[in-house]
Structures are given as C-alpha cells and as structure tokens.
C-alpha cells in the first residue's frame, strides 16, 4: 500500500477546498516588533505582522529578553528532564508563585503549552472524578474538546454563551454527580467575551466546579493582567483558571491556578504533565519577568486598546465589515476560503502586510476571515497603511460590504 498517495490525496482535497494552510517563513527582529523578515526564494523582505498573538510585544521587551539571556547563562539551555525525575527547577517554582499571585490563588502548575494544560487538566479531572459530567461551551477551543474527549467522562455541550441553556443542562444532571462547567473568557476567532458572572452564579447554584480558559485575556485585562475574571472581580469565585505564557506574556507554556489540593491533584495524575520534559528554566524566568512587569505597568494595555479602537473606527469609516466585540481581536469578514487566501496573499506580496487567512475547520464554513490583532507597537501610520490596502482590495476584488458579521 502506498501510504504517501493516501496522504497526498487528502492534502489535494484540502487545496481544492481552499482550506490548505500555507505558512510564511518569517524571521522576527528583536526590538523591531511588529516588523519581521519574510523569506521567499532565498531573499528577505520586511513585512508588518498583523496577526501575532504576542499581543503586547512582550516577547521582545528588553526586560524579558534580558531575563532569558541571564537565565540561559546561569542554568543552561534545557530543564534536564521531566518535572518528576530531574527537571523541577527553582525558576519553575518562582514562576508558579508569580502565577498564583496573579490570579489570587493558592497554587499554580506550569505546562509546556496552553494546549497541554487544557488537555491534561480536563482529561484528568474527567477521568478521576467518578460520575463526572463536563458541561462544555459550544465554542470551546480544540484543546478543551480533546481533553474532555480523552477523559471519557460524560460531555454535555451547551449553546455558546447561553446561560439559560447551561441551566437547563445543569438541572438535568443528578445533584450528587460532580459537574464541571468549562468555558473561555475571550473566544479567539470571534473575539466575544463570555458572560462570566452569570456563568459562575449558575455553576454555584448547582454546585458545579468552574473551569475558565483565559489564554486570550491574561496580560490583557484586569488591573494587573489577571484576565477578564480579575477585571470583573470574579477570580476568587472560579475554581480553576487556566492560561498561557505564549500570548500576551510573549513566551511559551501553559498553566493552571487554583487551590493547593487541585494543583497537586493534577500534578499527581496528569499524564501530560508527568511524562513530558519541563520548560527550560530560561523560559520560566522570562515569563515571570513579563508577568511581573505587566502587573504594575498598564502602558502596554492602554496603548493596545487605543490602537484597536483606531483600527475599528477606520474600518467603519471605509465600510469594511468586521465583527463587533468588546475584545482586542478584530475579525474582518470575507465569507469565502478562496477569496480569503487571495486577499492574504495580495496583502503580503504587494503591500508587505502579513495576516494569516482563517478558514475551516478553525471557523465554520462561510465565515472565513482575516483576523487582525493590533498591538501598542503598531503605529498610527501602520493602521493608515493597512486601511489603504484593504480599501483598495475591497474595490478591486468587488468584495461585499455586507458580509454577515453576526
């Protein structure tokens, strides 16, 4: 049997549908964010990155870079193994203390990525709690979905951000069954924010544990960057807060925070924690520096919000459809996978603007989009240039100004 033929057939199908993912070969320039070099056919060309999840540019902040360099010189490149054998380092424990403090929790536990922290924690909770039922928001991230699936616990999906539907589902579960309400604060593709207070109150009413994914909110919201739950004064009422070090904090890794018993439970039973090499201490040191900085500095958050508002106003002025939300994510709606890819290619090739097309299965078919994430380091001139490019393309490609953005 020719397995490569089987593989290639499915890849070819993706390309025909317009859903094949092409990756640009970018080289970030330290201290130059959002500029990067795009490598094509052996040549480099400077582009402006408009779709980075390094939302505040902290991955190139001098304090963060210096902390990582110092830690590499002090500890070396790697962790030395899994946390359980030889890989727990002082920098890991310092980072976990910083994270627990950020969310006002007793303890924290770090993982190699936000995907792994969700997958490991939900799969462990669902599999180890007898008769557990996990109630998952319909818009939850793939990492949460996979964790729930792997747990083999009973899964109940409730309509996205629909608290009435959540109550209906909770009411149907026996009172003595452990229940976990799993949801996100900021949903990354639409940029909408969950009704967290109503969800927490509903979970409390039915004795359910709350599990919130704040990966697109930590560093970005709250007086100290603790996420939307901090901004709303609700962090103390949420059982488990999960987050990432790889977005607004500019590094890599994931984590959970909660009670000592909860974090120790996950540490003791989660295969995704037990059997993988730990984060390099230098990454932990850099992440801790980033978190500590954003706890006391609001300059980055304020600058970012200012540029988001400016971009939205400019899009409105030109009649370019974008999805309205209260977050920092600006989805410009196209509604066709081929046109979305064509626009992204043209922006990159002609205008030097990099934005990745978002197609199925990341978003439902018919809702394809360009997802812009302005940072405080994008200048007013950058925004003006982007708007000029989009306005030109909207006219040239005859794209509808009335794409459904609901």
Image (spheres, grey):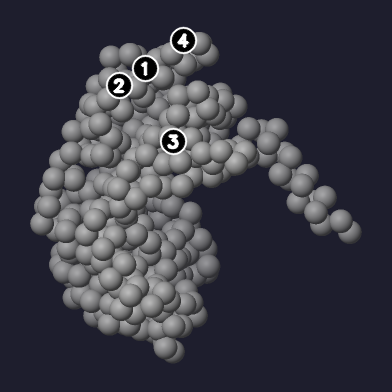
Whether the residues at callouts 1 and 4 have beta carbons within 8 Å, the answer is: no
Which residue matches tag 3?
A: 46
Labelled disc at residue 395: 4
Q: Nearer the viewer, mark 3 or mark 2?
A: 3
Q: Please name the residue that numbered disc 1 is placed on.
A: 388
Which element is circle 1 on?
helix
Dot 2: within a 10 Å radius of its alpha carbon, few (fewer than 14), some, or many (20 or more) residues?
few
Residue that badge 2 annotates: 384
Between 149 and 326, the one nearer to me in the picture: 326
Q: Kindly indicate whether the residue at mark 1 contacts the one at mark 3 (C-beta within 8 angstroms).
A: no
> CA–CA distance between discs 3 and 1?
18 Å
> Do residues under tags 1 and 2 come within 8 Å of each other at their CB atoms?
yes
Compared with residue 35, is residue 395 higher up or lower down, i.e. above or below? Answer: above
Kindly report the distance in space between the C-alpha atoms of the residues bearing marks 3 and 2: 18 Å
Percent coordinates x, y for residue 324 in the rendering: 30, 29
Q: Earlier in the sequence, mark 3 or mark 1?
A: 3
Numbered disc 4: secondary structure: helix
């Amino acid at each position: 049997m020719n397995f490569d033929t089987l593989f290639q057939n499915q890849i070819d199908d993706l390309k025909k549908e317009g859903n094949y993912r092409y990756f640009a070969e970018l080289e970030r320039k330290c201290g130059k964010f959002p500029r990067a070099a795009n490598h094509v056919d052996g040549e480099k060309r400077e582009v402006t990155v408009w779709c980075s999840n390094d939302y505040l540019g902290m991955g190139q902040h001098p304090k963060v870079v210096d902390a990582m360099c110092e830690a590499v010189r002090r500890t070396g490149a790697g962790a030395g193994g899994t946390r359980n054998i030889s890989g727990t380092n002082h920098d890991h424990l310092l980072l976990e203390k910083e994270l627990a403090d950020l969310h006002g929790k007793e303890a924290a536990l770090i993982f190699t990525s936000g995907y792994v922290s969700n997958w490991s924690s939900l799969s462990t909770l669902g599999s180890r709690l007898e008769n557990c039922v996990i109630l998952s928001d319909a818009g939850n991230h793939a990492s949460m979905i996979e964790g729930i699936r792997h747990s083999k616990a009973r899964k109940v999906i409730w309509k996205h951000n629909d608290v009435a539907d959540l109550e209906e589902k909770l009411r149907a579960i026996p009172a003595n069954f452990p229940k976990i309400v799993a949801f996100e604060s900021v949903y990354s593709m639409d940029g909408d924010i969950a009704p967290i207070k109503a969800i927490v109150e509903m979970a409390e009413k039915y004795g359910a544990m709350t599990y919130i994914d704040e990966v697109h909110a930590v560093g970005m919201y709250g007086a100290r960057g603790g996420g939307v739950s901090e901004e709303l004064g609700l962090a103390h009422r949420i059982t488990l807060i999960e987050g990432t070090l790889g977005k607004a904090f500019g590094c890599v890794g994931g984590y959970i925070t909660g009670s000592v018993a909860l974090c120790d439970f996950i540490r003791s039973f989660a295969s995704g924690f037990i059997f993988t090499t730990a984060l390099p201490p230098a990454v932990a040191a850099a992440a801790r520096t980033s978190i500590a900085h954003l706890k006391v500095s609001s300059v980055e958050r304020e600058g970012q919000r200012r540029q988001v508002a400016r971009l939205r106003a400019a899009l409105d002025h030109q009649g370019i459809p974008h999805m309205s939300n209260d977050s920092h994510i600006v989805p410009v709606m196209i509604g066709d996978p081929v046109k979305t890819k064509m626009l992204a290619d043209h922006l990159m090739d002609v205008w030097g603007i990099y934005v990745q097309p978002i197609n199925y299965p990341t978003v439902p078919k018919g809702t394809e989009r360009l997802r812009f994430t302005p940072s405080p380091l994008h200048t007013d001139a950058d925004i003006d240039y982007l708007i000029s490019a989009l306005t030109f393309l909207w006219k040239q490609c005859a794209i509808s100004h009335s794409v459904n953005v609901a």
